[in-house]
């Protein structure tokens, strides 16, 4: 009996070729496991029938189960790694799901919103649904179409027309054992075009070791692949085309390259990621050139309000953007959690620019905010790290961060590059609108270009931060304080610690402490403090006072301050020195020790650094 909707944020892969499909699919799932790791499964298609195997738990559980079976040799297969949205992940609820006759298998990412009605109709027709998933309904519907004589592609088109919601579906049928058919609506799906083999997947990481030639599918499209053909249609069956692109990172970028964790590798990649995000975006004279922005200067001059929408870490990047954008452009800038945005009926019109920040470009809360903004005729500019993902595609303009693949669930290099992208947009607006002189802009450009070296310096000096984590491993709570752009950094430091170390951690604006949170401080409570640069005298002095207040109550202070800040040295139980950088760029260096601290804390507490519990990399449900 179908009782709930269990499909969520998942990794999906499909393969049609000549190689051993099981190996290819498992390889793909391994690289997609960051998208969800509650359960995993595969289906292999041969003319003798379908073979499926699926298990609750990580991919390792599936591989263990497969070792006890004798999978057939097949050159067509599909696989799935899942992050459940409702209910407990079980073997039965894992994907793939089969039709009642076992002739069709399907994997799914997203939510079928009208699944209840469809399930009731199927049950009235005598179908027995074994799982609690919305996906099984699709398997039954697809198989019913195939039984009526439709080929799998036509069956997929017909079924998709009946579905409401957001979904990527990938299916195989033993009646067409050489074919994989996939469909998408508001959920990611890319095609990998190989030589004598083709792939479909939630993202290119799944097939990056086989091909860099990819096709991005549009909204409401079906793709049917065999070893040598790729055919795209809309849901009605009209021929359609995808957008061809070349993946510009390689398999090594998606592997750990000798680091114990992807997170450590990605932290270490930050200088390069920041440099790459800046690359080619200035003229030799220091003027900004954002070729891919796709909004005319006139349109940018007409903007009278900016609203940044994002979730989690990307939201913190947005909070920093408010300081720079307002300072450089004098345009009022609001920052809003994407999940809250559309439900409060925000005041937006054609002169509003909504900036949507999303590493994955697939976060459903952010996508829904984008759609709402566009319905109200606002201009939408996406900042994303994922070429061809849904949010950039649905936006009026895009600025890509060039961080490379971010595999660890906890966002690190994406955050720093998002901050840089926001700075670029702020400066570009200032350039176009004339709110900053050219030499002022090139001064900031110059400073931005020196940031990779500054981040490198921080990375060279973080060993004491690791020691500190080991020393504090048993504390129950850690607080983070910041002012001005240091405040979002404090929020980010706390978020990293929560998600990785499962500790109580909170970030506060330092000035707020006396209005309540100071009561949390007990003798020995560790408090990280982001000290404003000395160039901001009043802020610096206020923060020194705040540190005195918490020390008087027994806090153990960990102060992040620029080298040579003697006042900070005096009030720090532990001093973490940062290279002196302009105030508005300080988050790019101050965040790094906090990332390292959270990573090491997770390690010493015995947690999985790259795949923290209950989380998924790309949250494609609201
Ligand atoms: C935290 C983290 C999340 C993401 C958030 C938005 O480390 O990774 O908070 O920042 O889920 O994801 P994107 O940027 O893909 O929209």
Image (cartoon, rainbow, N blue to C red):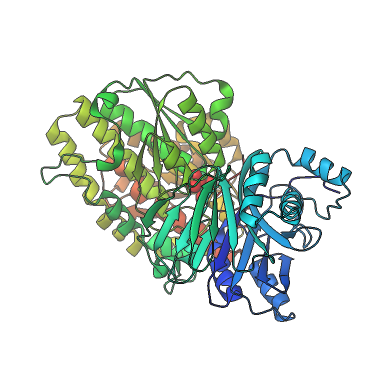
The picture places residue 40, in percent across and down from the top left corner, at 67, 64
Q: Horizontal placement of 305 versus 12: left or right?
A: left
Please tell me how many numbered marks the rendered image carries.
0
The picture places residue 515, in percent across and down from the top left corner, at 54, 28
The picture places residue 486, in percent across and down from the top left corner, at 40, 40
- Which residue corresponds to the image point at 39% horizontal and 62% vertical from the top-left? 213
Q: Nearer the viewer, residue 22 or 386?
A: 22
- Can residue 587 be seen here? yes
Q: Nearer the viewer, residue 71 or 335?
A: 71
Q: Quadrant of residue 432?
A: top left
The picture places residue 211, in percent across and down from the top left corner, at 42, 67
- Kindly give the residue lying farthest to the front in the view shown: 149
Q: Horizontal placement of 422 versus 66: left or right?
A: left
Q: Quadrant of residue 124?
A: top right
Q: Nearer the viewer, residue 46 or 52?
A: 46
- Which residue corresponds to the image point at 64% horizontal and 68% vertical from the top-left? 177
Q: Is residue 155 above or below residue 341?
A: below
Q: Horizontal placement of 62 versus 455: left or right?
A: right
- Which residue corresponds to the image point at 40% horizontal and 66% vertical from the top-left? 253
- Kindly give the residue lying farthest to the left in the view shown: 285
- Which residue corresponds to the image point at 69% horizontal and 72% vertical from the top-left? 47
Q: Quadrant of the C terminus?
A: top right
- Can residue 569 be seen here? no
Q: Horizontal placement of 511 versus 431: left or right?
A: right
């Amino acid at each position: 009996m179908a009782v709930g909707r269990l499909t969520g944020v998942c990794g999906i892969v499909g393969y049609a070729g000549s190689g051993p499909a099981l190996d290819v699919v498992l390889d793909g799932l391994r690289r997609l496991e960051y998208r969800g790791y509650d359960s995993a499964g595969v289906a292999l298609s041969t003319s003798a029938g379908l073979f499926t195997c699926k298990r609750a738990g990580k991919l390792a559980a599936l591989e263990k189960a497969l070792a006890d079976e004798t999978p057939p040799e097949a050159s067509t297969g599909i696989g799935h790694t899942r992050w459940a949205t409702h209910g407990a992940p079980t073997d039965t609820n894992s994907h793939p799901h089969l039709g009642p006759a076992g002739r069709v298998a399907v994997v799914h990412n997203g939510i079928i919103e009208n699944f209840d009605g469809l399930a009731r109709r199927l049950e009235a027709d005598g179908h027995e649904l074994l799982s609690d998933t919305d996906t099984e309904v699709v398997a039954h519907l697809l198989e019913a179409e195939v039984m009526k004589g439709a080929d799998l592609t036509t069956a997929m088109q017909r079924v998709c027309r009946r579905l409401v919601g957001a979904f990527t579906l990938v299916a195989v049928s033993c009646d067409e054992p050489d074919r994989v058919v996939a469909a998408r609506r508001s959920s990611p799906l890319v095609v990998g075009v190989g030589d004598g083999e083709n792939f479909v997947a939630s993202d290119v990481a799944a097939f990056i070791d086989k091909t860099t030639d990819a096709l991005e599918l549009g909204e409401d499209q079906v793709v049917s692949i065999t070893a040598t053909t790729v055919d795209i249609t809309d849901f009605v069956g009209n021929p359609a085309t995808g957008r061809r692109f070349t993946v510009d990172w390689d398999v090594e970028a998606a592997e750990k390259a000798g680091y114990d964790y992807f997170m450590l590798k990605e932290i270490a990649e930050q200088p390069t990621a920041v440099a790459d995000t800046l690359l080619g975006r200035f003229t030799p004279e220091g003027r900004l050139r954002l070729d891919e922005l796709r909004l005319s200067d006139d349109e940018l001059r007409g903007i009278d309000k900016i609203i940044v929408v994002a979730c989690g870490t990307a939201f913190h990047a947005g909070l920093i953007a408010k300081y720079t954008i307002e300072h450089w452009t004098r345009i009022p800038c609001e920052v809003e959690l994407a999940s809250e945005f559309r439900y409060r009926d925000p005041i937006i019109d054609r002169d509003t620019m909504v900036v949507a920040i999303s590493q994955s470009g697939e976060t459903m809360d952010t996508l829904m905010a984008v759609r709402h903004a566009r319905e109200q005729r606002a201009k939408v500019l996406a900042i994303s790290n994922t070429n061809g993902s849904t949010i950039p595609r649905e936006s009026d303009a895009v600025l890509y961060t060039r961080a490379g693949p971010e595999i660890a669930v906890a966002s690190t290099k994406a955050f720093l590059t998002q901050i840089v992208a926001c700075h670029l947009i702020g400066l570009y607006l200032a350039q176009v609108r004339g709110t900053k002189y050219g030499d002022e802009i090139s001064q900031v450009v110059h400073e931005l270009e020196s940031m990779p070296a500054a981040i490198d310096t921080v990375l060279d000096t973080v060993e004491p931060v690791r020691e500190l984590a080991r020393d504090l491993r048993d504390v129950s709570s850690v607080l983070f304080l910041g002012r001005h752009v240091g405040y979002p950094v404090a929020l980010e430091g706390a978020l990293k610690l929560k998600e990785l170390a499962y500790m109580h951690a909170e970030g506060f604006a330092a000035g707020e402490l006396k209005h309540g949170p100071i009561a949390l401080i007990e003798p020995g409570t560790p408090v990280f403090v982001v000290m404003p640069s000395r160039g901001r005298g009043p802020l610096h002095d206020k923060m020194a006072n705040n540190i005195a207040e918490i020390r008087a109550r027994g806090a153990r202070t960990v102060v992040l301050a620029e080298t040579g800040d003697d006042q900070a040295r005096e009030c720090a139980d532990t001093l973490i020195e940062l290279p002196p950088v302009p105030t508005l760029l300080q988050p790019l260096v101050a965040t790094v020790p906090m990332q390292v601290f959270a990573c090491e804390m997770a390690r010493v507490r015995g947690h999985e650094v790259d795949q923290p519990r209950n989380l998924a990399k790309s949250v494609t449900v609201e």
